[in-house]
Image: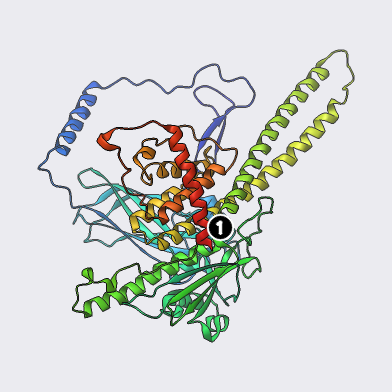
Amino acid sequence: ADFCGQKGLIVSVDDSGTVAIQYLGTKPPVQAMISPIRELNYDKIDEEHRALLLIIRESQNENKSESTERLVIRSQMPKTLDLEQISEVDLPSTLAPLYTSMSGMSNHSQFVKICVRIYLTYSGGNKNATNVSIILSTPAYIHAVPKNFLLSKVAGLKSTPTMVKVYLYANKAFIPSSLEASVSATYLTSKGEPRVATHTLQLPLYLTCRPKAPMKTASCKVILDTTCEAFAGAVSLTDLFDDFLLASQESGCDVSEVLGNNAMQAMGFQLWSPAQINSTATASASPPSPAVNGSASAAVVSVLVSKNAGRYRVQADSYPALYVVLAELERRLIDKVGAIIAAAKSETDIDPSNNALFSGSIVRCTDPLPLDEYFASISAHFKTRQSLVQMNAQLNDLAHQFRLVQKRLLVRFKDKNPTPLSGLDTLLKETYTKLLQTSDSISELQSRLTQQTAELECFSKLIVCMASMRFSFPPNERMLLQSYLCPIIQEASEQGWEETVDAAIGFAVTSSLARTAKESSNTFVKTNIDMPSSLDSLRKNIVTLMDRLEKGGKLSALPPQMPGGSSSNTSSSSNAAVGGVVGAGSGSAKRSGK
């Protein structure tokens, strides 16, 4: 192609829509490629400047009332999995290859698919919202097609709502980490003001698992207790998961034959994804192969009910596999039991706010936190990261060696008086072979790291869930704890999970969870977060965090202050105090484990 007078350029477009102009060889174009210079229109610049100043003055007016115009987003989930062929949907051209590659996938492939309808309505009367840009944020195991799209306008309330179809593909190769997705929309009001609207999608449970006969024994167990003075007994599993059973039945699964006659007290959930037994205890273990529908490697989570005691035992052979079912069970119990307790409150003449009859959390968990297994999962993830760093360094050295051998061979070939190659050709072949082997090893390590990252995310959320029920956390405390233990880490980021969590928990321990003002005055904020050489600091911080939370500490509390607002910089005494707490925390963890 010709561009700005330069010939022989190559124009390429990737699957994300990025356009690149490239050339062959090592000599760049001599002339700079710049767009034609346009003369500035000062009158138009002054007019735009005055208009912006007017908008700024109007926005700073104290008497100005906030606009009532809003973009309302709602969603409709399907009742079953989409087992038919993909219907037609308007897609951006950049997503067409992905759409084509995924079309025709059924329940027996590596993906399961549902079609979600998103409805948009503008509460501006006869007015319209313009330039509506919608972005879907999904968990790692979910692929949305399309993931973002642009609408020129959305009509007001008097018009038919704008409907958009979005296809969600759940990858069976990855363990599910969440059942929530979000829809964010940016738009302009009728007055040209930018606004943002958000909506949370509650994904159906059948997108991640299917009914299965429960297992009688398992190595990983968590018990939930719903007994309180205002509510006795237990809600049956068929009442809790009625929509899941109905969706599975309509998808072709004979629920009565799979679960038997005891479905009210025992139910199994077979995840589409595999999970390693004992939660990836060793880093050298090979990554599990993707689970195929009905494969033996798929994880099975069983829920057993003690009807009279009001307890629910969730068990599986892997802790990460427990999280999705445990979190969904907790959410449904809170809705069901909470509605029963609310009805009981309305029927009594006693003020519930002043009565201990209705105090306490609806769902509780008194089981000790599985920190040993959690540390094993962290260690496996960390060792894989270390191996990946070493293999990348080895690949860099081999590539450097390969280039040097190439240069020496070129010098020998250009020499007018030929000289022996002295084994350089053999060295070139061996280096090239090692390059291919190292590249394959890096690809395998990256796949293993992706699997272990998904499992570590599920395990971290399981720890947050159990700790929140164990310590009776309100929603804000639970969100804070999840922000410390479950950071959002991009795969291409230089900062990994271990160093990020270590820095976050270290700050929390010496600030809101500090025992004394002297300890809080030595709060240390890391400016350079690099990959650590060991996990000792992370283990100590996690044990200290759980120990102080068990003793009544609050993440949202203000750090203790020195008398008179003075501060102390005795770092040695602070370090000694932290060391003492770490030891105490370890003992507490062991006692709770007993």
Query: Number of numbered discs present?
Result: 1
Query: SS for tag 1?
Result: helix
Coordinates of residue 75 in the picture (x, y in percent): 36, 63
Residue 127, above or below 1? below
Q: For this view, does 479 lie left or right of residue 96?
A: left
Q: Is residue 543 visible?
A: no
Give residue 390's quadrant in the image.
top right
Query: What's the residue at 41%, 59% (across, down)?
Result: 468
Where the N terminus falls, by quadrant? top right
Q: Is residue 382 above or below residue 251?
A: above
Q: In the orientation shown, which residue stands out farthest toward the right?
A: 420
| Residue that extends furthest to the left in the rendered view of this protein | 63
Task: Write the residue at 20% across / 52% down.
Answer: 69
The residue identified by callout 1 is: 102
Q: Please tell me in which quadrant of the rendered image residue 342 appears.
A: bottom left
Type of amino acid under label 1: Met
**Residue at image coords 88%, 13%:** 417
Residue 572: x and y in percent read 46, 33
Depth check, front residue: 294 or 493: 493
For this rendering, which residue is in front, 116 or 566?
566
Picture coordinates of residue 137, whole percent (x, y): 43, 52
Q: Residue at x 49, y 63 (%)?
A: 324
The residue closer to the viewer here, 437 or 7, is 437
Residue 541 appears in the rendering = yes
Q: Pointer 1: residues within 10 angstroms few (<14), some, or many (20+)? A: some
Give the farthest residue toward the bottom.
Answer: 261
Instruction: Specify whether 59 is left or right of 563.
Output: left
Give coordinates of residue 458: x percent, y percent.
51, 57
Relative placement, left or right, of 421 versus 200 is right
